[in-house]
Amino acid sequence: MDDLDRLEADSIHILREAYASLRPLVMLWSLGKDSNAMIWLARKAFLGEVPFPVAHLDTGLEFPETYAFRERYAKEWGLKLIDDACPPIEEVDPNLPPNSRLAARKSLGLRQALTRHGFKGVIAGIRRDEQATRAKERVFSPRGADGAWDFRDQPPEFWDSYHPAPPQDGHVRVHPLLRWTEIDVWRYIQRESIPVVPLYFAKNGKRYRSLGEIGITFPIDSDAADIPSILAELAATRAPERAGRAMDHDSEDAFERLRATGYM
Amino acid sequence: MTAVLAQAARLPDAIPANANGEAPLPIVFVGHVDHGKSTLLGRILHDTDSLPDGKLAELRAISAKRGLENEWSFALDALQIERDQGITVDTTQVWFRTRRRTYRAIDAPGHAEFVRNMATGASAAAAAVLVVDAKQGIGEQTRRHAAILDLLGLKRVVVAVNKMDLVDFAQSRFGELVREIGALFDALGGAVAAIVPIAARTGDNIATRSAAMPWYRGATLLDVLDGFDAPKPLSDGPLRLPVQDVYRRGDKRFVVGRIESGRLAVGDGIRIVPGGRLARVAEFHDWNRTTPRTRAEAGESVAIAFDTEVFAERGSWITTPDTSRDAGDVLRVRLLWLGAEALAPGKVLRVALGTGQREAKIERIGQVIEPGHGTAKPGTLGRNGLASVDLKLVAPIAADSFAELPATGRGIVVENGRVVGGFVVERATDAVIAASEKLIFPTDDPIDAAARHRANGHRAGVFWLTGLSGAGKSTLAQAAARRLFERGRQVRILDGDDLRNGLNADLGFAPEDRDENVRRTAHVARLFAQSGFLVIVALISPLRTHRDLARKVVGDDFHEIHIQADIDACRQRDPKGLYARADAGKIGGFTGVSAPYEDPASPDFALDTVALSPAEAVDRLVDFVETHAARAR
């Protein structure tokens, strides 16, 4: 087994633990590279079919390429897609920094989905190497009734003896990709030939390294038009992955505040 | 110091992480609060050129905002509260790369309140750096963390004596601490790989040798880390596949789980524990592989189908067929207790071990390994304390001893849905599986089989009568036994109904109970046979796996005898009125009516009690037994 085999096996183990213990369960599909790899892992874990719905928290502001991707692969992969629209910007806490407010719409959208469908488990494709507060996460992370993350009182997590029981009126976030790095994900996409939104590949000297909504996501200068070039670029770069995400940089704790209130 | 900084190793950028397919080595940084863990890790990130662009400037800016010199720890302590209070609240992870390999560094908080977070960080690691302040020496949490590292089974431990700059880089102070640290680990029965004098803030002896400590001739901290071997998967160990779930696809059922130890291939025989049923691996299910696997080994998550319908559920284990013992209900564990209130005997908790879960009662709290935070009465265990604890489970669970098979010898305790402790199995008493036979020491029988043969004038054996209820097993067994006894043979009947009155009174007729009934009966038969007896067993034992198991337990002198009578004949005879009750729906799972009976594929002997008269059947059975009894050894 090489390191990718090991990561794959452990993620499958986590997904199966979640499915055995948390019902109803949902997987968040942001349509980005990580969540596509995650759906791929779920198909491996569950012998070809994803046995729970996948939810796209839709702000209506994705790139056209992203919507086209969603329509095509929801069908091809046989996904039970939930694509409820997120609440409008007016419902978001006006005290949040401007760029964070769009992200906060997604938190509200998730809360709405939790209320509507009563999910006890929410699988999300976050990685520890993406962002410093995500590095603090547990594989199985309990959330209170309001979806908030109490990072002061996280449960102990011994080895991979997980105990994914949801707290009263709350749910559990499940993070099967926590141990993966950006490079791991691209190597896996390459090995498994997993489709991704074409915006990741360079056109006219620009590509998206991290994909979010129009207006708060910006491309980087790059000529990497295929996966080997992307891997070469990542091996050499010293720029953080989310440099093109405006909401991370509103203030020193912008992302922490988002996550504490339930953002992915 | 600037000279040292200038020498800091710059690593080649061209090697992509994990180019060799080796996973990053997870390494935890632990120690007493303020002894400098986060600072050390921040410094390592800098010295190995692992900080992203702009991070150093960001660190300087947020340090300046708080009126501090450059605070390396801010690279790790991402939360506002951590930066404001200068402590690490929760474990975090970052990556760094040396010439040798990539590391996944886990920063674990030192504050006493956050022992659970420290344990979380440490249990995810394969190696550890324990940081000790050169001036303050060993702190309360240095001791506790050393004990927790030992409990978690971390064997690759290096102690970094930090802040040597605050003791003027004095060799004598380092010497004192080396003795104290040595004594601490000796008391725990553990060992450290190296003790390195460092100054994290200035980088002394981290990536490069310190000009300020020429008396230190050992390796730098990073060189010690690079000397650690990566842990190897347990592919060569005994097979352990804890069942996570069973998925149905079409008409096939697939058992899914991750192989924790050993290997498995199509065609291999397996045993399911608890229960002991035997089966063979028919196939692996692999989505999106051009050719499905035919074999797998420790570390792989698999889905397998068996050649026969066998009952397995979440919590069961797939093991090798020769696994000699079954699940048990008493565990002695070493426990790290994280509950708010002191743990006392009599408390009921939930134990989760692998994929199995059971209610458990605390029977006894033994030697406290490291006293807890706050006060605890004798025989109790305070919060954040470690002790040897005996647990009595309501029902058996499969477990290994941690020392032999770590992955299947550890677990957690849960109270009201919250994880309140982690443990390793010290000893799985009674019938719990052992990784090998090392834990049991069978005594030699002073009288050997040949001596018993000579004394009795015949050899021993087990004659296992299987067949439907009413086929005539008990009747034949009794008549044959009487005749054999009259001829001076040592003979013993084991009748299913009799055993269910005593030895097996705790068992019902659920599939796993029937398996256990067979297993126990086979072991008792074996004991009688070892004592020189001719043992006639009358037991329906409806499944082939039942008789296979019995043959395996007894060994060479086992004879499977099929007492044949069709269901209509049995129903007509109905000596105990059972068919009438079963047909009326008053007995569920009745063999031949609402539960299967599998005819023996190739019995050693068969008697048709419909075609033969009772007297003829007895004659033939006695002849068969006598032929075996008369055979020379």
Image: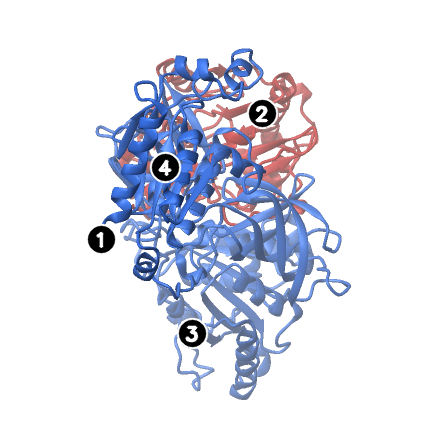
Chain colours: A red, B blue
Instruction: Look at label 3 and name its amino acid.
Output: Val
- The numbered dot on residue A67 is none
Q: Are marks 3 and 4 on the same chain?
A: yes
Q: In this view, does A69 lie to the left or right of B376?
A: left
Marks 3 and 1: which is nearer the front?
A: 1
- Is residue B362 among what the camera can see? yes
Q: Mark 3 lies on which chain?
A: B
Marks 4 and 2: which is nearer the front?
A: 4
Instruction: Look at label 2 and name its amino acid.
Output: Lys
Q: Mark 1 points at which residue?
A: B632
Q: Name the residue under label 2.
A: A106
Badge 2 marks a residue whose secondary structure is helix
Q: Are marks 1 and 4 on the same chain?
A: yes
Instruction: Of the two numbered discs 3 and 1 on the same chain, state the one appearing first in sequence.
Output: 3
Q: Name the residue under label 4.
A: B464
* Contact flag, marks 3 and 1 (Cβ < 8 Å): no
Q: Mark 3 points at which residue?
A: B4
- Residue A199: x %, y % from top left: 36, 26
* Contact flag, marks 1 and 4 (Cβ < 8 Å): no
* Contact flag, marks 2 and 1 (Cβ < 8 Å): no
Instruction: Look at label 1 and name its amino acid.
Output: Ala
Q: Do labels 3 and 2 share a chain?
A: no
